[in-house]
Amino acid sequence: MNGLEIKDVVVDFGSFRLDAALSVPRGCVTGLVGRNGAGKSTLIKAIMRQAEIASGSILYNDTPFYGNETEVLRKIACVFDTPHFSTALKPKRVVKIVKGMYPAFDGELYDGLMKKFGLPGDKPVKTFSTGMKRKFGLILALCQKPEILLLDEPTAGIDPYDRGVVIDLIQQFMLDEGHTVLFSTHITEDLDKIADYIAFMQNGKILLSEEKESLCESYRLVQAPEISEEMKKGAIGVQKSMFGYTFLTKQKEVRGEDVLVKTPTVEEIFVHLLGEGER
């Protein structure tokens, strides 16, 4: 079963068009990667009905949105890249509003997480740093007790220690096998830690969506002082530096003097596939 089934969803802004199809497996963390402007935030806004869908449909745990609006919106929570509430409000006031919308809101969990992150409850959110705002957004989302959690760059602007805490919270959320996470990020190191699936987005389209381990195992990262004609045949996203050449390949064996071959990380795949696309 899929937590989200995005079926040929089109959002057309004139200057930019999203045309995406993606299955987000239930019980898994799916990482959504792509450059700025690739359409990641637009896709998340479409899922949350914050962007008008021209055509296509979305199922939420097999439930269509229309006719089930209240049920669907209570199953899903989102941490947007910027707050979707007045930052002039203090957290206590924001929580009061959110509690009225989400009866299952966990006040005890809220108090514990605010203390854990050291966030003040009596200062306007606009006085928070970018990292503090993202942490506050994640706290609100988790305390809604959702089944589906959407995260748009949740660790951007957060220091390394708190990034680790955020990753731990996501992992705790996923202890319930009925939960689903779609995680948009530029910090692909985070995806190496927690993602089960990777979806690569470019120019408003999903170019690939695969299980992370299978994706990484399907490539090899090669570093070589020189690139032979045989290497060039399977080379993807070739990069040249003063030390030689680095590229991806699907060839399992690449031989040569002083050639290093390893299984790539998500970030290395992303960088070289992007370079191939640019080329």
Image (spheres, rainbow, N blue to C red):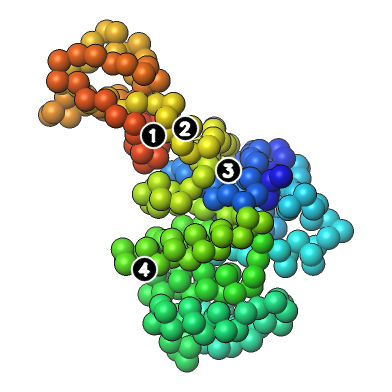
Q: Nearer the viewer, residue 96 or 106?
A: 106
Which of marks 2 and 3 precedes in the sequence? 3
Looking at the rendered structure, the secondary structure element under dot 4 is helix
Q: CA distance from mark 2 to mark 4?
A: 28 Å
Q: Which mark is on residue 162? A: 4
Looking at the rendered structure, the secondary structure element under dot 2 is helix
Q: Are marks 1 and 2 in contact (CB under 8 Å)?
A: yes
Say above or below: 216 vs 18: above
x and y percentages locating residue 103 in the rendered image: 72, 79
Q: Furthest residue to the bottom?
A: 122
* Residue corresponding to mark 3: 16
How dense is the environment of label 2, judged by Cα within 10 Å: few (below 14), some, or many (20 and up)? some
Say above or below: 170 vs 144: above
Name the residue at 27% across, 8% down: 229
Name the residue at 52% across, 85% down: 111
Amino acid at the residue labelled 1: Ile
Looking at the rendered structure, the secondary structure element under dot 3 is loop
Label 1 vs label 3, nearer the camera: 1
Which of marks 3 and 1 precedes in the sequence? 3
Name the residue at 16% across, 24% down: 244
* Residue corresponding to mark 2: 215
Which of marks 4 and 3 precedes in the sequence? 3
Image quadrant assignment for residue 268: top left
Amino acid at the residue labelled 4: Asp
Q: Nearer the viewer, residue 7 or 213?
A: 213
Amino acid at the residue labelled 2: Leu
Look at the image and tell me whether residue 43 can be seen.
Answer: yes
* Residue corresponding to mark 1: 269
